[in-house]
Amino acid sequence: MSNCRVRETDEKLDAILYYLMEKRGLDFSGYHSAMLERCIHLRLKATSSEDFDDYLSCLRKDDAELDHLLGVLTVNVTRFFRDTLTFELIADRILPVIIREKSRSNDSSLRIWSAGCANGAEPYSMAILLRELLEKEVHAMNLHIFATDIDSDALDAARKALYSMESLEHVKCHILRKYFVPECERFRLIPEVRSMVTFSVFDLLDKKHSVPPESVFGNFDLVFCLNCLIYFNIDYQEIIFDKLYHSLAKNSYLIMGTAEAPPMKYRYHFNRVFDFSRIYQKK
């Protein structure tokens, strides 16, 4: 493709992104261009649009198509205990250390943030881990689990907590029986676990807030940001990571995706806890 064609494609892509920003206040300009083009081409095919210009006209005529496009752009397939090794390490090596240190300092508050939580499988997985762990602990804890995403439809689904068997393929049998109730070929998470998580819409590029407003303040003991940064270019990754860094309490933990790592600016502000997992501890 010639440079002229590339510039023309970029300009048409920018026009679509500007319209999204104008109508919904969401800024996708930091996403990788190749990923954006793939997503938009899916909607071109679905709407029988000939090109980006034709698709932009479609967007302007049909507000429902905006929702369809946002659904494609923000899709994040998640499963309970998706990265099995990471969750095993958190359960066996990370949470016991956090709880022990909390007990020593007479601090009964444990704060967790799941950024980009999609359908809620990730924060609910943490809620289940904590219930299992704290059943064996004498030290009582006040748990605060905040889960955010920019996709309000995904958050609505998370609050309902009704999951397919595919979402639960990594769940152990005794956990499935203990925490889920069969319902029309699906499984609904019990209310006691659902009530442990606070869901809210939050854009990681929000210029007004460094942490989810519902959390009031940061000082998180553990932050999940798995497979979120990979969608953004380097400049936007640094903006997001700045939020993550300042949201964490000293010596707390950041969980990232297998293809992700702290930007160079922050490499020396974290220790990688295990060579074989993307779990980092803030210095």
Image: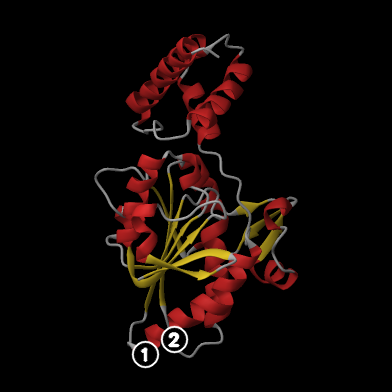
Apparent side of residue 67 relative to residue 251 in the rendered image (left or right): right
Q: Which residue is mark 1?
A: 104
Height in image: 93 above or below 120?
below
Residue type at mark 1: give it: Arg
Instruction: Give the spatial CA distance, label 2 vs label 1.
Output: 6 Å
Residue in the foreground of this view, choosing between 173 and 93 = 93
Q: What is the x, y in percent for residue 140?
A: 43, 84
Apparent side of residue 270 relative to residue 52 in the rendered image (left or right): left
Q: What is the x, y in percent for residue 211?
A: 31, 55
Tell me the quarter of the picture where residue 133 sits. Answer: bottom right
Q: Residue at x 56, y 44 (%)?
A: 76
Height in image: 130 above or below 258?
below
Tell me the quarter of the picture where residue 103 sits. Answer: bottom left
Tag of residue 202: none
Query: In this orientation, does residue 192 appear?
Result: no
Height in image: 26 above or below 58?
below
Query: In this orientation, does residue 183 appear?
Result: yes
Residue occupying the far left of the picture: 208
Tag of residue 100: 2
Element class at badge 1: helix
If the image is split into quadrants, where does the N terminus sit? top right
If the image is split into quadrants, where does the C terminus sit? bottom left
Badge 1: how crowded within 10 Å, few (<14), some, or many (20+)?
few
Residue type at mark 2: give it: Arg
Residue in the foreground of this view, choosing between 112 and 92 = 92
Q: Residue at x 55, y 32 (%)?
A: 72
Residue in the foreground of this view, choosing between 178 and 253 = 253
Residue in the foreground of this view, choosing between 220 and 200 = 220
Q: Residue at x 58, y 8 (%)?
A: 50
